[in-house]
Amino acid sequence: MRGGFTQVEETLLREGRSDSVSQQRRDFHDVMGERFKQVIEEETGRTVAAMISGSHQHPDLVAEMFVLEQAEVLADQPPG
């Protein structure tokens, strides 16, 4: 996703404080990661194996990726 930085982050970036932005995003991920995984699991009915969060500052790109465990296949249904 392009344009994912907040106004505060954009201000810090303009002032050369990219390390502060990166640290803030890591801290937020540490605090909110389990909550985000819980929402994904509730919505999909599948277990989150991993959550990968990243940002790139030039160009401005942000990504959140959830890797899901393989879905259970019912014995009486063909895979598909």
Image (spheres, helix red, strand yellow):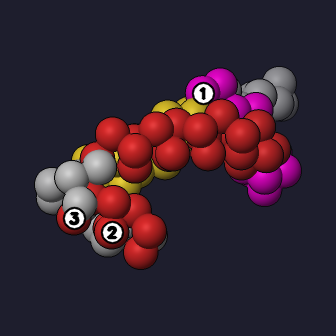
Q: Which residues are magenta?
A: 39-50
Label 2: state its secondary structure.
helix
Looking at the rendered image, the disc whose residue lies closer to the viewer, 1 or 3, is: 3
Query: Where, by quadrant of the figure, is residue 78 drawn?
Result: top right
Relative to 26, is 20 on the left or the right? left
Would you call the spot at circle 2 few (<14 residues within 10 Å), some (14-19), or many (20 or more)? some
Using the rendered image of the protein, determine whether residue 79 is visible from the camera's viewpoint.
Answer: no
Distance Cα–Cα, label 1 vs label 2: 31 Å
Question: What residue is disc 2 on?
Answer: 11
Is label 2 in contact with label 3 (beta carbons under 8 Å)? yes
Please report whichever mark, 1 or 3, sits nearer to the chain's N-terminal start.
3
Quarter holding the C terminus?
A: top right
At which x and y percent is residue 38?
A: 81, 44
The single residue placed furthest to the bottom in the displayed view is: 7
Label 3: state its secondary structure.
helix
Residue at x 76% of width, y 32% of height? 47
Question: What residue is disc 1 on?
Answer: 50
Where 52 sits versus 15, above or below?
A: above
